[in-house]
Amino acid sequence: MTAGTTALAATGLGKKYRRTWALKDCSLSVPEGRVVALVGPNGAGKTTLLHLVVGLLAPDQGDVTVLGSSAGTTRTLSRVAFLAQDKPLYDGFSVADMLRFGARTNPGWDQDMAVRRLASLDIPLDRRVGKLSGGQQAQVALTVALAKRPELLVLDEPLANLDPLARHEVMRGLMAAVAESGMTVVLSSHVVSDLVDTCDWLVVLNGGRVQVSGDIEDLLAGHRLLTGPAELADGVAGRLAVVDDDRTDRQATLLVRTGEGRPPLDPRWTDRGVNLEELVLAYLRRPDSAALPKPALARA
Amino acid sequence: MIDFRLDRGSGVATYLQLVHQVKHALRLGVLRPGDRLPTAKEVVDKLAINPNTVLKAYRELEREGLVAGKPGLGTFVQRTLGGASVTEHARLRDSLAGWVSDARTAGLDPEDIEALFASVVLDSFRIGEDTA
């Protein structure tokens, strides 16, 4: 897998609809070969960010670079595949028609791979798209996107409206494609549990701003959940970066950013590691908290 | 070929679960030197996990000298774990089964048995260290 190059970079990116900023001061940098989870509540600006990345929207502020060149240029677009939220398929088309359509509109089209992939999924080429199950439609849409042989694949809520089995199948197929090609994937979701074990980079978007962007393993290792007496909480909060703070009159539960290593603590505190869901929820509850790499320390 | 399973609620990091399962298979003789581990693609196609996780597990096993990657061919088992041979294993398993049934007759429940076994293992190796 290639390392060291940047697949996606945004600096001061902003997008305004009428007078409201859907996205503001958004800066992030994602290395190549990553599977990026873009999470955030509805209306956080996820779709806007994805549309800026694939060139469907032009920024009102800042800029976004994809695979080393400006987003939206013809050259960039030939290396990027985008799967919109509403699965862009034509119900009246047969599956074979969809592939023909893909072949006509994409120069680097890999018909063999598309046919092989659909055969392994038992999806008949002569079936009309409208007659397929939701899971099969998702697989056809993903196949069309993969057959373009993209270096960056962008998926907007690819698992929405799918049952648990179909979600697993789609993720399996996606992970196998990543293993084969080493491409970078960005996918948005508001269901964090779908992203555990599949994504290795986390971007949290909240209220149009980037709250978190980083390697998931590093983020999990760099946060801890502390539980202890409420009267000691202010002392800890003064020393450590508290992301989320939940107190009753006796007890305090603090999710803190520790960075590397474990901080020395009063023995009355218990501390443990956090999982991805806890980490995301803590940040979403506290829109003012942020975990972003300092520009000087950002990994290429 | 080893068949990986994940315990998603265990709290053990996914790559470590893969490492443990390979070691377990080596101890039980399910995997032997020369055997090929499944490719990252084969593993992720089954488990729906990030391929980098599989590569990380294999790197860890490689670091411990248990497997070696051959470019273009795959990852192969280099050596086995656990000193005894397969027949020795079978003999020891039989005598341990005898002891467990003895313990059950004496009224010990599974937790009692595990605690007793663990403490004997601990004592035995501690004595080993002292005399070494």
Image (cartoon, coloured by chain):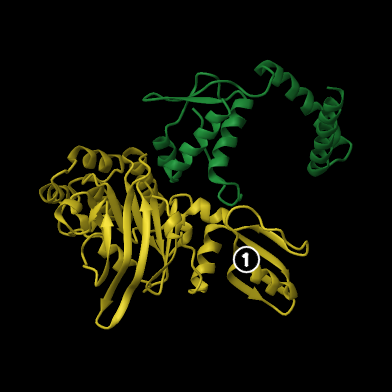
* Position of residue A184 in the picture relative to residue B128 (left or right): left
Residue position marked by numbered label 1 in the rendering: A240
Asked if residue A133 shows in the view, the reply is no
Near-viewer residue (A5 or B86): A5
Percent x, y of residue B67: 52, 25
- The letter of the green chain is B
Residue at the spot 18% in from the left edge and 50% down from the top edge: A78
Q: Find the residue positioned furthest to the bottom.
A: A19
Percent x, y of residue B31: 55, 24
Establish if A140 lies above or below A235: above
Q: Quadrant of residue B66?
A: top right
Establish if A298 lies above or below B31: below
Percent x, y of residue A51: 26, 64
Q: Quadrant of residue B125?
A: top right
Residue at the spot 34% in from the left edge and 73% down from the top edge: A24
Residue at the spot 45% in from the left edge and 54% down from the top edge: A297
* Position of residue A183 in the picture relative to residue A297 (left or right): left
Near-viewer residue (A243 or B35): A243
- The letter of the yellow chain is A
Near-viewer residue (B115 or A230): A230
Q: Chain of mark 1?
A: A
Quadrant location of the N terminus of chain A in the rendered image? top left
- Amino acid bearing label 1: Leu
Establish if B80 lies above or below A287: above
Asked if residue A72 shows in the view, the reply is yes
Q: Find the residue positioned furthest to the front.
A: A296
